[in-house]
Amino acid sequence: MQDISKIRNFSIVAHIDHGKSTLADRLLEMCGAVAERDMEDQLLDNMELERERGITIKARAVRLSYTASDGETYALNLIDTPGHVDFNYEVSRSLVACEGALLVVDASQGIEAQTLANTYLAIDAGLEVLPVINKIDLPAADPDRVAHEIEDVIGIPALDAPRVSAKTGLGMEAVPEYIVNNIPAPTGDPSAPLRCLIFDSQYDPYKGVIVYLRVTDGTLRTGDRVLMMQSGAEYDVVECGVLGARNLVPTGELGPGEVGYLTASIKNVRDCEVGDTVTHADMPAPEALPGYRKVQSMVFSGVYPADGAKYPDLRDALEKLRLNDASLTFEPESSAALGFGFRCGFLGLLHMEVIQERLEREFSLDLITTAPSVSYNIHLTDGTEKMIQNPLDFPDGTTLDYAEEPFVKASIISPPEYTGAIMELCQERRGVYRDMTYLDATRVELHYDLPLGEIIYDFFDALKSRTRGYASLDYEISDFRKSDLVKLDILLNGDIIDALSFIVHKDKAYPRARKICEKLKDNIPRQLFEIPVQAAIGGKIIARETVKALRKDVLAKCYGGDITRKKKLLEKQKEGKKRMRTFGTVEVPQEAFMAVLKLDED
Amino acid sequence: MRTDATRRSGPGAPLGLYIHIPFCRRKCAYCDFYSLERADDAALMDRYLAALLRQMEETSVTIADPVDSVYIGGGTPTVFGADRLAALLELISRRFELTKRAEITCEANPESSDKKLLKRLRKAGVNRVSFGVQSACDAELKALGRLHDFEGAKAAVEAARSAGIENISIDLMYGIEGQTQESWARTLGAAAALEPRHISAYGLKVEPGTPLARRAGVGEVFLPSDDAQADMYETACRVLALAGYRHYEISNWAKPGYESRHNLRYWRLEPYCGFGAAAHSDCFGVRSAAPRDIMRYIEAVESGGEVFEDYDRIPDSERAFEYVMLGLRTSDGISKRRLTNVYRLDPDSAKDELEALAQAGLVEDLPDSVRLTEKGFLLSNTLILRIFDSLKPIRSPFAKEQR
């Protein structure tokens, strides 16, 4: 069993793009976790999507073996975490399995909004936070300034922090030593009743669910009969071990402080949900470990298969994804326009995009998604209240007393020259100004209260474009506030298309309605009949466009040599139609739904 | 046994012959037919002629059907020269059973059709000439890369008449770069004033691989919009109807009795036999195509090997689609009796759809047939798909008993 004093469990937190995954790659290489020839960038981000977008979505763990200057060999368990605000939940989950965290800060960018947010998450979790100043090879690097900034803004010592370039490897040799010397070893009694915290899980078609866990007390061995304290499920451990860079390494046992995995032919992922405690069935621990606070879905959207027959496939795919993404929620719903589907809850818009892309890529599903919505708290005239996630549940004027919408506390860090542009943007999005502080001469932090509904669409993109990419954003949900909200319906050829309805602030309803009608007009192909595209509030039309009737769709010439070719052309046209949804007599292509989701600023 | 017209063989079911002449003095920018700019290559033409004669001769042995239409197309058949064309027609009259009133068409371009040549053709049996006139506006002719002006076209029509060929057809084109509603109306008027028996008006289509497609792809050409082309089409319908032409196919108008018998074959799924490079055939239930390469074609014939490269035995279910696709191009439309008896499709099953389309003025649902209106012609792609999709197979009477 691994000597507990030679274990260091740590994670890396950073703002997106500050080089977290590169630093992890370098550590893996230095500790010989991967042979040089097998080395590839973003090694821990093995999801196709993560590599493509250059982001970390899933937390991932790996064990490194490091021989320190004291001659001892240490087991360093690195848990890589996402940087994007949408995935804070993944971060906080991983942090509970650690005693320390490396805080990676870009030597030219300095502290940004997510740096602060993730650092506070780590400090709140009681972790030792160790700054590392990265990218010192860049011409604009100013490590001294950044070190002072870390001390001033976060209040942790940073002058002795390693200054490295993870990309070139410069200064990296100091990092593992720094970890060994500064992160405390875990504590725990190997003979106490077993308690392990499940911090992640993943479905494997051969082994069943792979449970990632951190042992707090006791010893877990292959063959043990274990009990999941929350779900009550019992299993015999088939395999347990530690986590290699590319594969699972069975060790037969895991002692206190260790980070590893177990498999037990678990078919049902709900038997071993993240946050549950694993103990021995015949000698259960008297008390479970504190789990995780249940994650709150913030953004909701209807997800429907483009082909109605694929509904069961979509359900299976969602269940599989939930296995390793506990923050995804979904429940069945149906729409007159789209048939049967699911109302899914996401952490944010990026999370929503990621889930949709994974469904389409990993499960080859063609999806239609409805406009994202937040949760609204509806107060009815009869004094009752209810939370709704689907715009269709929005009551009509006679039964609605008032509605409340969620607000976030947003923190935006930016160079001061963009303050005006940011304030203007927040104003447009119905933001309430709180305060503004200068972090130093070159950066200012603004606090705003903003309606969540206003930032889930394109706020981040707009912020980036108005500040030339310099501003960073972080936010957390604060409270529900009374708002003047209305439901906007979209009608095609006089029929309400329920999948296109959404809830919007009254002052925004007109411009939004106009824009949506325009977008639909541009994205619905002309058809045999003229199609009125209308937007309405409670039966009153407030915007209208017309898709003119198609006038010309003809093959002018068709003689002997053309027949086969023309037949193929028509078949192709027919295939194209299959990918459209028919509402009454109107055919709507999937792109039209997507276009409504992407209402840009322009 | 119920069969397709294309499957019929034996005497009684007349056949059409198509001969492809893949030579042009210059290729037009929009054209994607198979043709070579080798109008001066007499040696190649002679070799091609020999191959054509041999292919026709060999084919004639297997065909007992009478022939009631011959169509020499291209390319520009007239650049092939009167002697070679006459040789082809001589062989046809000798080896095939031409009916008395067979329609024998030769395509021609104004600049390569003088009276002498037309007289020779008339003598060799040609009784119909189809001129590529395209436009009455010289600027548009230039934009298309044509070698003649409108005066030349007028002269060619006169020459054909004085050569004794009364059945003249002219091709027009709308949707040309720089063309306006006014210039198109002028072209239609000028064309009608020539009093041809038959007029074809084609919307210019940018075909992939043509010089026009390349220029359009890089934004060098600005063609009239679809809506402008639709207006032009409607103008053609109006003007030509007033001039006494009957609109008998999407792009074809004729004085009564002068509909092109040969071209109607294609739309009625009647059999035809093609000769030459890139020529297609559809007879005995098989559609086939010769190589789109003159040397491959010549070598195939000379070696005594198989000329046709693509053989496509069309199953009945596909024939049904072809029947709807092609039949709806004509003013006769599709026959309900033929749908029922030949293709086992139930016209009643499309009733609701037809009614909706009729209400929109796109379709006429008649007791014996279904056809498109002129407005419907312009939307025929969509309508063909919708009408075919709504046609359900006839339920077998046995299936009923079993239930």
Image (spheres, coloured by chain):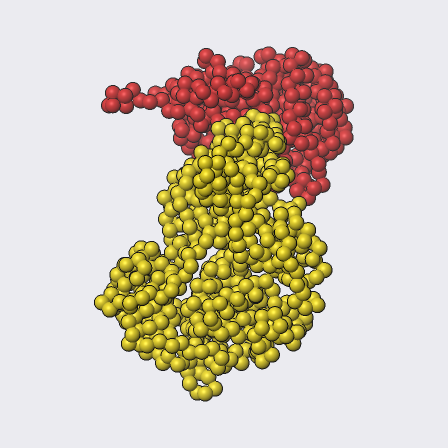
Question: Horizontal placement of A560 versus B163: left or right?
Answer: left
Single out the residue that lies furthest toward the left.
A282
Does residue B238 lie above or below A197 as drawn? above
Depth check: give the residue in front, B23 or B119. Answer: B23
Residue A600 placed where, x, y %?
62, 46
Q: What residue is shown at x 35% (from left), y 62% (from top)? A: A276
Does residue A533 lie above or below A310 as drawn? above
Single out the residue that lies furthest toward the front.
A383
Q: Quadrant of the C terminus of chain B?
A: top left
Question: Horizontal placement of B143 versus B8: left or right?
Answer: right
The hue of chain B in the figure is red
Q: Which chain is yellow?
A: A
Q: What residue is shown at x 48% (from left), y 28% (from top)? A: A584
Q: What residue is shown at x 49% (from left), y 57% (from top)? A: A49
Does residue A542 lie above or below A286 as drawn? above
Depth check: give the residue in front, A519 or A155. Answer: A155
Regarding residue B25, the answer to whether it shows in the image is no
Q: Quadrant of the N terminus of chain B?
A: top left
Depth check: give the residue in front, B250 or A467. Answer: A467
Residue A161 placed where, x, y %?
57, 78
Residue B312 placed where, x, y %?
44, 34
Mark count = 0
